[in-house]
Image: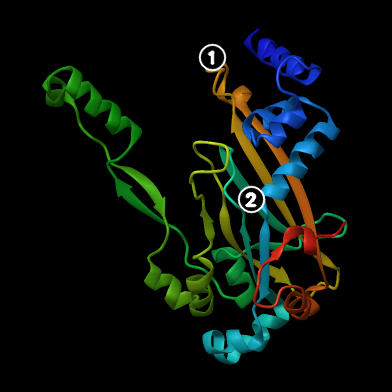
Amino acid sequence: MMRSAALAGVLLLLAGCGPSLGGLIEAKHYREAICAANEGGEGTRAEVGGALDKDADLQVHVHVVSAEELRPVLGAATDKVLARGRLARVMVESNVLPVDAVEFEASFVTEGGLVAGLDAGWETLAWVTQEKLPSRRREQTYATPGNFLRGGAAVLTLGLSLLFTEFQPGTLEVDAPPSEYARMAPLATRLRTTTERGGCKSPTLPALSSATGAGQRCTFYFVLDNVSRAPVALELKARYLAMRHNAVMLREADRRCAVERTFRVPFGPPATMEEVARTKFGARTRAIGEVAAR
């Protein structure tokens, strides 16, 4: 019932009872516009998404690591690693908008939509360096659900239950220590020192026409299969989020509104990506509209 009422409110908004969609966009009331687009058709989502893209001014930069950059890190193994895969860094940044959140999702895909690159985590780096990673270990711990319940019972009984309670250790799988990674996979460890810096930072600052706003800044690292000759493209998804703050009785999933935009930046085969990326970007970021396929 509550969701029906919220939907009816949006339909009335679109029908002319209240500010028009164009009015919301012009006034930068993007939270309301996103929720209206969430319930509207493809044209409505495109209109709101286009306005968000314009004000977000999405900036992107792609750098494919060269042999000269890798040689001080990998030494004599550089050429062997490059023959197997290419390491790419993707940086994306938006302006701060009057929305509740901005999310980025990046991937490399073929023309047919197949995955062409993987996140540069431990397993992927070990694949490209052809090294074996240490196995996860099992350790004993008293931080188990059963012991947590036993401790709670002790609090409720003012400690009396401790007279009859025996805390039992459990086992937990943990990663091997860094020294084991460095010993078994020294090349992957050196690469991981760089790729672990990736991640996102969400600036929340005063935004135009709103008390608070949100933006996003992300860095992604990928390994691409250099044996493949299939052309690849960076697929970037930007997700603009808003919450229905006046509908607290709804489930969180029903309160959440989103407009998602997808962009593709072509690069050709992985073997020529380094030159293509240098031509497209050089040392500076570019607006996504300047480099994305139309």
Left of 280 or right of it: where is 102?
left
Left of 63 or right of it: where is 208?
left
Q: Nearer the viewer, residue 291 or 151?
A: 291
The quarter in which the N terminus is drawn is top right
Q: Report x, y in % for residue 220.
A: 60, 62
Q: Residue tagged by mark 1?
A: 249
The quarter in which the C terminus is drawn is bottom right
Q: Report x, y in % for residue 172.
A: 38, 47
> Which of the 4 image quadrants contains residue 41?
top right
Disc 2 marks a residue whose amino acid type is Phe
Nearer the N terminus, badge 2 or badge 1? 2
Q: Is residue 127 above or below residue 24?
A: below
Given the current orientation, which residue lies at the most extreme bottom position? 76
SS category of the residue bearing label 2: strand
Q: How many marks?
A: 2
Residue 37 makes an appearance in the image: no
> Which of the 4 image quadrants contains residue 39?
top right
Q: Nearer the viewer, residue 129 or 212?
A: 212
| Number of other residues with Cα within 10 Å of mark 2, as a class: few under 14, some 14 to 19, many 20 or more | many
> Which of the 4 image quadrants contains residue 34?
top right
Residue located at (71% from left, 16% from top): 7
Q: Report x, y in % for residue 22.
A: 76, 31
Q: Report x, y in % for residue 141.
A: 29, 46
Residue located at (65% from left, 41% from top): 240
| Number of other residues with Cα within 10 Å of mark 1, as a class: few under 14, some 14 to 19, many 20 or more | few
* Color theme of the render: rainbow
Q: Is residue 109 above or below residue 43?
A: below
Q: Is residue 60 above or below residue 144?
A: below
Number of the label disc, if any, that sits on residue 104:
2
SS category of the residue bearing label 1: loop
Residue located at (75% from left, 45% from top): 261
